[in-house]
Each structure stands twice: as C-alpha cells, then as structure tokens.
Amino acid sequence: MIIGIYLLLPILQAIFQAISDRRDLQIYLLTIWVIVTCWPIYQPLPLISLIKQSSLLGYGGYFVLGGIIAISNRRKTATTLWVATYLVSVTITFVLTYCFSQRANTSVETAYEYFSFNVTTSSIAAFVLFYKVEGSVRLASILQWIGDRCFLIFFMHVLILERVNNRIMELDLWLPKFGSILLISLITFCICILLSACLRLIPKSRIILG
C-alpha cells in the first residue's frame, strides 16, 4: 500500500498544486473522499465497488487533504471550536465502539479505523491544535525537525513496530500492559527517528522518499 502511494506521489503533488488555490475543488475533493473512503466503513455502498479508486482516494486523498490543511489559515478559527471538535469526535469513537461491542458481544473496533469519519475529524482537530500551540523557538525547531521526517516515520513504523513488539515479548519483561505499550511505542519511535535522520542525509531524498 505504501509503495503504491509513492508511485502515485507525482500525481498527488500535481493534484495538490492544482487545487491549492481553488476552494471549490478542495470542497469537491473532500466530499468525494468522505463518500468513497469514510462512508463505506459504517454503511457499504454498492457504487463504491464500481469506482475502484481506493488507492487514490484512500491514503492518497488523505495526504492531499493534509497538505490543504497545512496551507490553510487556521488562525481564523477559535481554538475552543477545535477543542470541542476533538472531544466530540473522540467521544463518538468511544461510544460507537462500546455500542458495536455490546451488540456483537465481542470487541469490535470499527470506529477506530483510520478512515472512519470520527477518527479523521479528531486527527484534523488535533493537527490544528498542535499548530496553534505557541512555544519557544527551540521547541519549534525541534518539532519542525521531527515534522520533516513524519512521512518517513509513517512509512517504516509498521515494520519496526512488529519487530520491536516481538523482541519485547521474547524478553518476557514484567511490566503492566500499559507499560509494555508505552515502552514499545517509545522504542519504535526512536528507531524510526534515527533511521529517518539517516535517510535525510541522502541527497535529493525528499524527491525520492517524500
């Protein structure tokens, strides 16, 4: 899947440049993306199987929408509105998970899927809230440095996470479940950051790796 996104990267860049200053096209893309990508998670639509554009309108559309949010003027919107949006969408995720699990009498995590509308909304709200946080120049430079490597981290974290998880399980450390999850997450993040920093040393790596 990730390799497919890299193959589409030049096309995605062209789409982003074409709609970056066109509000009508941005709304059109958002509408189509929600219908094709988010809606079928809760309610299957027969028409979607005919479109067959899951790669372009899945993660591909997600990246384009992320670029639109990055260049938009988020300062005009009140912080309280974004906080409320985040809290409401997270609450909806919890409530839906509880209801689905109760109905099925087993754990059902449909509401936690990346492309569910509630998760997408909470992700956008969290992104904007992070943008609105004001800190020192030093903190801003650190976050910018990490942000420059986010795409690489996203690309490799699944493979690293699986291996770190297996290794931690082999060590049989006596840790509560929360502690194990935290340890695995921190180790995975550190390894991904280190590998991303090394990859950024390659000339023209942004063109090749994003």
Image: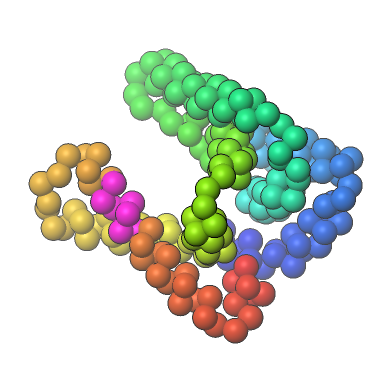
Taking 26 as reference, is 98 left or right?
A: left
- The foreground one among 41 and 146 is 146
Colour mode?
rainbow
Would you say residue 123 is visible in this rendering?
no
Residue plotted at (29% across, 53% down): 184
Taking 189 as reference, is 61 left or right?
A: right
What x and y, as percent, mark residue 160? 37, 62
- The foreground one among 162 and 81 is 81
Depicted 201 relative to depicted 41: above or below:
below
The residue range painted magenta reads: 182-188
What x and y, as percent, mark residue 35? 72, 34
Taking 147 as reference, is 101 left or right?
A: left
What x and y, as percent, mark residue 11? 77, 63
Residue plotted at (17% across, 39% down): 176
In the image, farthest residue toward the bottom: 203
**In terms of image quadrants, where is residue 162?**
bottom left
Taking 168 as reference, is 75 left or right?
A: right
Quarter of the figure with the N terminus: bottom right
Residue plotted at (52% across, 25% down): 87
Residue 76 within the magenta-colored segment of the rendering: no
Depicted 180 relative to depicted 193: above or below:
above
- The foreground one among 46 and 167 is 167
